[in-house]
Image: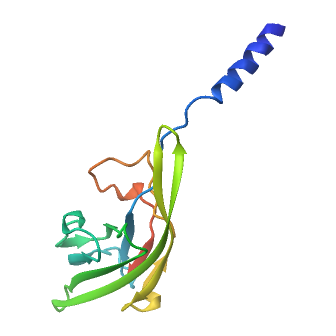
Amino acid sequence: MKYAVLIVICVLFGSCLNDGNCLITATNNMHIQFKKLSNSKDSAILLNTVQISGVSKDSIPPVNAKVTEILIPIDIHDTTTIFILQRTNPADSTTHYDTLQVGYTAQTKVIAKDCGAFTYYQNLKVLSSNLKDSQIKAFSTSLLTDPTLYVAGSANYQAYAVNYQIFY
C-alpha cells in the first residue's frame, strides 16, 4: 500500500514534465458580422469587394456575394489596417464604400519550446470610420481562434471570436 502512494506521486510529478500542447489560438483574421438595424432575420448584405491596406490581394477573400459575416486579414507588418468594404444596396442598386480603420498591438508569445513563438494581436479598436458609432458594436478585442474548431482552408466562422458587428 505504501508503494502505491509513491507510484501515484511519481506519476503525477512525471506528467508535469511532459511537453506542452501546441494548441495555437493566434490568428491574424478579424471576424466581422453584418446585421440589419431592423429585426429582420435576413441580415445578409451584398458585399462586392474588400480592399485591405498592406495586405496582398492574394490574401483577400473574394466576395461578390450576399454575406452575413466575413473573415478578413489585418496587416501583420503594421499596427493599423484600413478596410474598404464595397457593398450594394439591393433596394435601389446604389454602391456604398464603408471605410474602417482599426488599430491593434502585437505580442509574441512562446507556447512551448517545441511549438515556437506565435504573434497574438490584441487591443483591437476602431480608430476611424465613415460609419456612425451606433452602427459598430465591438465584441472581442483580440484576434483569436478556437483550435478545436479550426479546419485549415475553410471559413469556419464559429472557430473565430467575433470582433465586430456592423449594422446597416
Q: Quadrant of residue 11?
A: top right
**Viewer-nearest residue: 97 or 83:** 83
**Viewer-nearest residue: 119 or 124:** 119
Residue 89: where, in percent of width, then height? 22, 87
Q: Residue furthest right?
A: 2
Q: Residue at x 36, y 81 (%)?
A: 36
Residue 15: where, in percent of width, then height? 64, 26
Residue 107: where, in percent of width, then height? 52, 62
**Viewer-nearest residue: 18 or 7:** 18
Image position of 127 with respect to 143: above or below: below
- Numbered-mark total: 0
Is residue 141 at least partly visible in the picture?
yes
Image position of 14 with respect to 151: above or below: above
Residue 63: where, in percent of width, then height? 20, 70
**Viewer-nearest residue: 39 or 105:** 105
Image position of 99 with respect to 72: above or below: below
Q: Quadrant of the C terminus?
A: bottom left
Q: Residue at x 32, y 86 (%)?
A: 99
Q: Quadrant of residue 38?
A: bottom left
Q: Residue at x 36, y 92 (%)?
A: 130
Q: Quadrant of the N terminus?
A: top right
Q: Residue at x 15, y 89 (%)?
A: 93
Q: Is residue 94 left or right of residue 39?
A: left
